[in-house]
Image (tube, helix red, strand yellow):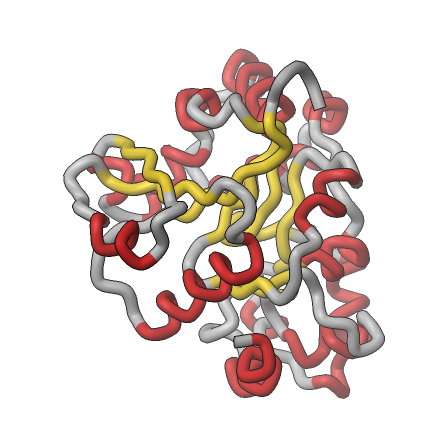
Amino acid sequence: MAGNKSLVAVVIPVYQADLTDAERASLRQCMHVLGNYPVIVVKPESLDLSAFQKEYPSLTFQSFDNSFFKGVDAYNRLMVSIDFYKTFTAYEYMLIYQLDAFVFRDELKEWCAKGYDYIGAPSLHQPEFDSLPAASAQEFANALSTRRVVLNGGLSLRRIPSILRYLKIYNTFYPAWKGNEDMLFCQEATRLKPMKLFMKLPDWQEALRFAFEKSPAATYELTNHQLPFACHAWERYDPAFWAPFMAVNQ
């Protein structure tokens, strides 16, 4: 950690004031487990979230132009913007925690200490691997070993100086990135050989210890029944698997 920087902030993107029950549970769990870290809500300039601060007085807020919150493509533009990361240079790391995530325990400092530049839940872009049962754990492992894996950005730890360096170099030599932001930081970082030098990524086995996303039942077998630090998109991929774990942790 360089200079006088703080180690890590938790950054929560919020698009609207009215949260679903699942989003409220996600925020409540985040504040319960990670509330001793700086927690910063990223929001549109015009959005009034004063009700959030009444409930969680330690929250702080960082506004960006409303246009960045108009849809998935707009959000992707924000997340590959150099100006976005410059806003958080008081910190060495940021944990992006979208409100479809759920954290189980505080391992944040331990994950920062591993020194990765980017880490998220391993994901495959083939629907056949979205919700495999426990009995298909080996099939899922084979797929993760032989296919291009995305480390999903919805719950992801990012080393801010490294991301800034990576974006500056990428923007100098390649056309503006138009796809999902997480693919720029993992798939492009391995596909484009020069960029491999500028992004330290975990292997999929270690990334599963950080977070589960797709096929959590099969993933749970691969980790020998060890829950990860957190999970992402739990409502979308096998919520029945997660229900008993979340009941215990709330």
- Judge by depth and name the residue closer to the eye, 90 or 101: 90
The residue that appears at 55% across and 78% down in the rendered structure is 246
The residue that appears at 45% across and 40% down in the rendered structure is 179
Report x, y in % for residue 182.
54, 43
Q: How many numbered discs, if any?
A: 0
The residue that appears at 52% across and 23% down in the rendered structure is 90
- Judge by depth and name the residue closer to the eye, 75 or 150: 75
Q: Which quarter of the rendering shows the N terminus?
A: top right
Report x, y in % for residue 237.
52, 75
Relative to 55, is 180 above or below? above
The residue that appears at 80% across and 58% down in the rendered structure is 205
Residue 74 location, quadrant: top left
Relative to 209, is 45 above or below? above
Residue 8 location, quadrant: top right
- Judge by depth and name the residue closer to the eye, 246 or 223: 246
Relative to 83, is 56 above or below? below
Report x, y in % for residue 18.
22, 62
- Left or right of 201? Residue 44 is left
Residue 142 location, quadrant: bottom right
- Left or right of 26? Residue 166 is right
Report x, y in % for residue 103.
58, 63
